[in-house]
Amino acid sequence: MARIHLFVLFLSSLILFVNAQFEYFQMVQQWPLATCTGTPCLNPPSNKFTIHGLWPSNFSNAILVCKGSTFNSTNTAFLALEPLLNQYWPDLISKNNRGFWRYEWNKHGTCSESVFNQVQYFQTTLNIRTNPNYDLLAILKTARLIPTGSISHRYHVIEGAIRAAIGKKPGLRCNINKKTRNSQLHEIVLCFDKNGVTLIDCPFPRKCPTQFKWLLS
Ligand SMILES: *[C@@H]1O[C@H](CO)[C@@H](O)[C@H](O)[C@H]1NC(C)=O
Ligand SMILES: *[C@@H]1O[C@H](CO)[C@@H](O)[C@H](O)[C@H]1NC(C)=O
């Protein structure tokens, strides 16, 4: 009886492992002011996109949540990444950067552990954020699209400017400003193949209305 029980446990852990297969990455960058109008932030919002996370995802539109190796903040190779992580991947809300990285790794990063260990996962994310070809603010500025707070931006114009620059379809996510009730640009997603390098079209439907604000702090 006990043996059968163990065997069933073994089978179900195999199934969990198979379920944790991911199909592509969502590289999610947030506009700090839009994050911080919903939740007060200890980190003063700057006018720069910061990393929210690199999310292993399914084409079925599921963002996967997994369990794997727990976050290790004493790994020396990881510690070497911290200066760049502090710059590009800050915890806006509670200023607890390591806590934010731990959360993102334990929830999302572990879903791609078949491809990237913890150090490689954070390095891959930094590589995308620091690649000048994917500098979202620079791309939008070149297209004369800037945050102002007052102008309404059209989804297809912002999406089109990024698509023209990088050759693939980005995903935009909006949230509602609790004070003004306006929709505002919250996050921009770039999608990558399982290798974390090759850009692909983001496969999910848009998560913004046709027009929205883009706040300036
Ligand atoms: C993700 O996709 C893989 C491969 O198609 C599949 O095995 C798995 O069940 C999917 N997981 C979820 C949560 O949709
Ligand atoms: C964390 O990484 C360091 C250096 O690679 C290693 O010595 C240590 O055992 C790891 N800690 C855990 C809890 O895995």
Image (cartoon, rainbow, N blue to C red):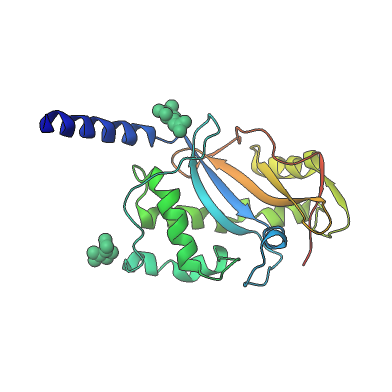
Q: Residue at x 69, y 68 (%)?
A: 46
Q: Is residue 196 above or below residue 80?
A: above
Q: Position of residue 187 (x, y in %)?
A: 66, 50
Image quadrant where one finds the C terminus? bottom right
Expressed as whole percent of the image width and height from the top left, the position of residue 194 reads: 45, 38
Residue 29 in view, yes or no: yes
How many marks on residues? 0
Pick the quarter of the image with the N terminus.
Answer: top left
Quarter of the view holding residue 172: top right
Residue 160 position (above or below residue 102): above
> x and y percent of residue 126 in the render?
50, 58
Q: Evaluate whether residue 84 shows in this view.
A: no
The picture quadrant where one finds residue 73 is bottom left
Please name the residue shown 46% across and 40% down the image.
Answer: 64
Q: Position of residue 66 (x, y in %)?
A: 40, 44
Viewer-closest of 105 and 153: 105
What residue sits 70% from the left and 52% below the top?
186
Q: Is residue 11 left or right of residue 139?
A: left
The foreground one among 102 and 140 is 102
Compared with 199, 132 (above or below) is: below
Work out whether 102 lies above or below 159.
Answer: below
Residue at the spot 56% in from the left edge and 41% down from the top edge? 191
The one of 55 and 194 positioned closer to us in this rendering: 55
**Residue 106 shown left or right of residue 3 in the figure:** right
Which image quarter has ligand 1? top left
Residue pushed farthest front? 1
